[in-house]
Amino acid sequence: MRKEEVPQDEDLINAGLRKDIYYALDENGEFVQVLSTGWDAKNTVILQAWEAVQEGVEAARQAVLRGEASPLLYHIRRCQMDVKLLSDYTGFSKSKIRRHCTPRGFKKISYEEVQCYARALGIKPEQLYHIPDA
Amino acid sequence: MPEQVLAGVPRELFTHISSAHCENGAIAVLLHHKGLSLSEPLIFGIGGGLFFSHMPFVRLHGMPVTSFRPLPGQIFRRLSRRLGIRVVTRRFRNPEEAMDALDANLAQGIPTACLVGVFHLPYFPPHYRFHFNAHNLVVFLREGHRYYISDPVMPEVTTLTRDELALVRFAKGTAAPRGKMYWIEEVPENPPLRQAILRGIRRNMYDMLAIPLPFFGVKGIRYLARRMQQWPRRLGSRRAALYLGQVVRMQEEIGTGGAGFRYMYAAFLSEAGRLLRDEDFRSFALEMNHIGDLWRQFAIEAARLCKNRHSENICSGYISVAHYLRLIADAEEAFYKKVWHKARVLLGS
């Protein structure tokens, strides 16, 4: 790739936060570092992965609203985790976490367990009980 | 109130270097601090960082892993062996132990690299936060509970609190870092650069051409092409598009320098040519650059396919991107054979 071909396709997902470094040929035929604000092809696939995660989050939110799951399931999805990963973070068994993902099991969570979940999920303890409205 | 602990390398004596890739970047920063300045492509090339693997049985987010880099830590291990750099690596059982050891290092003024997970890194934009556990950053200064971080993919020095740093060092999931940290003890005065470059190339070409398993190198690219054709039939168009998107994401993900490190390797070959005073490497670099362009073209086609995943003849779309991969594999194979031969001739083996 030549220097002037390095894509500068800015998108919301990059929004000036970070720039990619490319190695490209300059006019003297030397390779130099060139900054890029983004690339359409890459933006497409990052957005696609992001939307797939969001679909799962929304599905979990609906399930909580219907009373079929507990807010814990929503938070697990939001953090792109699964039961196995949360089990690694908290040290709780997977079956225990699965139980806590049901509305009935959720009622039985102890104070310490809430603290532990909150830390692993990066939220405040009281947030564990809530899901956003939309 | 207890006295503020201040330990490490003073801000003004520390050089932050931005790199495309985090592992090379961390190495570059550590080496620079020890008085050996090597460019990122040179580190990458000597460490034999060019790679391809597709292993359907290793999964990340429930999808098979396609990777354009060797295992984390490999580049550094090979580089230090070839240049005679003495490195210390440690892993820990628990966060307290790991943070105490880091503090002890900083107290002695040793900048120390840590392997971390990116998901809990607060300065990463949300769209880039995945449970990916092979990010490298360098900690060089502690001010009470604040740690100064030189993250190679960030433009500037950043900071993390003690808790944040402990959390990312003990991220969980695939390939958990388990608090791994490493630092340089000794750098030789006159490292054998010429030898190291040629050995780096020779080994790298072996990795790309001759590992006797179908998942790696050029064979891995063909293997991926074969499996890719079946994705729409086996998984349905939705999941197939996610799989394909993941391949492109790994290829262009943070820090590859574009085209799954192919452009970076081109820059390395060019620099190697200058250091070895050999004209052939000049044309090698251009050819590698061209191979990078092929990968970019593949990414464009693949992204288009992901976007139009509802269109009619999705299967033929996958067959055509898979075919593109085969063309890349052919081009890479022919090229690597040439480079391998050249390196062997120059090494006299």
Image (cartoon, coloured by chain):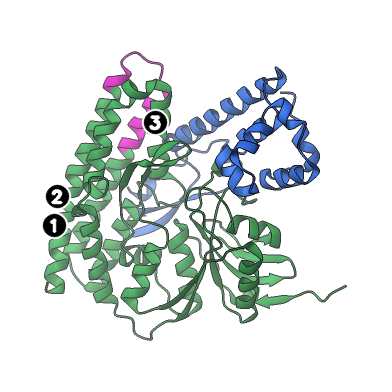
Chain colours: A blue, B green
Q: Which residues are magenta?
A: B297-316
Badge 2 and badge 1 both on one subunit: yes
The amino acid on which the numbered mark 1 sits, given as a three-letter code, is: Lys
- Neighbourhood count class around disc 3 (C-alpha, 10 Å): few under 14, some 14–19, many 20 upward: many
Question: Quarter holding the N terminus of chain B?
Answer: bottom right
- CB of mark 2 within 8 Å of CB of mark 1? yes
Q: Which label was assigned to residue B303? A: 3
Q: In front: B107, or A124? A: A124
Residue B72 is at least partly visible in this image: yes
**Residue at 41% in and 33% down:** B245
**Residue at 51% in and 32% down:** A47
Chain at numbered mark 3: B
Q: Is residue B260 magenta?
A: no
Q: Which label was assigned to residue B334? A: 2
The amino acid on which the numbered mark 2 sits, given as a three-letter code, is: Ala
- Neighbourhood count class around disc 2 (C-alpha, 10 Å): few under 14, some 14–19, many 20 upward: few
**Residue at 65% in and 38% down:** A96
- Location of mark 1 (residue): B338
> Relative to residue B196, is residue B156 drawn left or right?
right
